[in-house]
């Protein structure tokens, strides 16, 4: 007996996640919600861990937004945007690349989406998906021009002093569970902040997460070395170490 289709719900509003899950349970009892996420990063990690058939993504989430998460997840799942901003989703929907539901959630409109998903799940993703997501990403960046300023420096203890490290001098960040190693032009330092916290404050035009525990300064990338089975490593300018790129982030280097 085959298990029913599975879904992931990503939204920074807990009540909306619960409401959407409840509506889906009523409209599509066979669909199992296997995970929820509060932001784009958690969505990428959950998609990697659970391999859901369908991913519901709020477009506007803190840190990694829904569009960037969709680009990372790509064709491994059927994507559905949940948004209060129709203009972003409508363009993708009209091209047939991505489905969408609009906030506030409406059971009748969601029922239409569910019917389309039942027909499409398991099928091939539309050829236009990558191009549509790239366009949406660009439009979203333009629309978010009023966002708060990005992190300008990192405060770290170096010996017996506290050092303010200019963010443009940072080569990469690598974390374990409690600490993050900051590698910059002047050396290395450990700070008591997680990658998860830091990446929310870093300019995504300069920094990119390439692995669950690694963030790199894109301006410092020398080359990307591709391996077997959708693996890759990044080498930075003037550095010998190789940093792993997980499959979820390979899309960042498709043009390299």
Image (cartoon, rainbow, N blue to C red):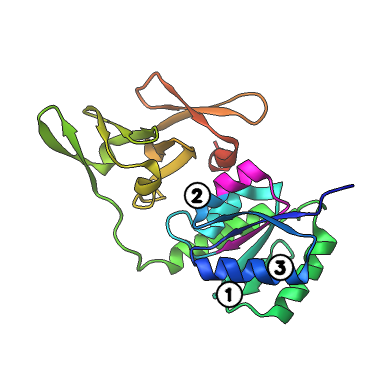
Kindly identify which residue carries mark 2: 41
Label number found at residue 250: none
Q: Residue at x 41, y 50 (%)?
A: 204
Earlier in the chain: of badge 2 and badge 1, it is 2
From the viewer's side, name the closer residue of 161 and 242: 161
Can the viewer see residue 108 in this picture?
yes
Kindly identify which residue carries mark 1: 87
> What separation in Å lies between label 3 and label 2 (alpha carbons)?
23 Å
Q: Residue at x 58, y 79 (%)?
A: 104
Q: Nearer the viewer, mark 2 or mark 1?
A: 2
Q: Nearer the viewer, mark 3 or mark 2?
A: 3
The answer to whether the residues at label 2 and label 1 have Cβ atoms under 8 Å apart is: no
Q: Residue placed farthest to the right in the image? A: 1
The answer to whether the residues at label 3 and label 1 have Cβ atoms under 8 Å apart is: no
> What separation in Å lies between label 3 and label 1 (alpha carbons)?
24 Å
The C terminus, quarter of image: top right
Earlier in the chain: of badge 3 and badge 1, it is 3
Kindly identify which residue carries mark 3: 24
Q: Residue at x 38, y 52 (%)?
A: 200
Is 36 rendered above or below residue 72? below
Relative side of 233 to 180, left or right: right
User: Element type at marker 3?
Assistant: helix
> What separation in Å lies between label 2 and label 1 (alpha carbons)?
24 Å
Tally of marks: 3
Boundaries of the magenta span? 44-58
Q: Position of residue 21 (x, y in %)?
A: 65, 66
Q: Position of residue 148 (x, y in %)?
A: 31, 63
Relative side of 146 to 163, left or right: right
Say few, some or many: other residues with alpha carbon within 10 Å of mark 2 (under 14 / 14 to 19 / 20 or more): many
């Amino acid at each position: 007996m085959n298990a029913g289709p599975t879904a992931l719900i990503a939204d920074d509003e807990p009540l909306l996640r619960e409401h959407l899950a409840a509506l889906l349970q009523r409209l599509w009892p066979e669909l199992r919600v296997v995970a929820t996420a509060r932001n784009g990063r958690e969505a990428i990690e959950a998609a990697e861990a659970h391999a859901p058939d369908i991913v519901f993504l709020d477009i506007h989430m803190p840190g990694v937004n829904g569009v960037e998460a969709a680009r990372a997840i790509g064709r491994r799942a059927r994507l559905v945007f949940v948004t209060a901003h129709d203009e972003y989703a409508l363009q993708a929907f009209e091209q047939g690349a991505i489905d969408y539901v609009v906030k506030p959630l409406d059971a009748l409109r969601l029922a239409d989406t569910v019917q389309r998903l039942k027909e499409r799940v398991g099928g091939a993703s539309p050829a236009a998906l990558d191009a549509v997501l790239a366009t949406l990403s660009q439009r979203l960046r333009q629309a978010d021009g009023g966002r708060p300023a990005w992190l300008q420096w990192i405060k770290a203890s170096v010996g017996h002093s506290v050092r303010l490290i200019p963010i443009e001098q940072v080569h990469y960040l690598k974390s374990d569970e409690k600490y993050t190693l900051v590698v910059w032009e002047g050396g290395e330092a450990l700070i008591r902040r997680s990658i998860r916290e830091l990446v929310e404050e870093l300019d995504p035009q300069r920094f990119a997460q390439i692995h669950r525990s690694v963030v790199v300064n894109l301006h410092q990338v020398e080359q990307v070395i591709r391996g077997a089975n959708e693996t890759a490593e990044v080498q930075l300018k003037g550095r010998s170490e190789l940093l792993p790129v997980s499959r979820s982030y390979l899309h960042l280097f498709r043009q390299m």
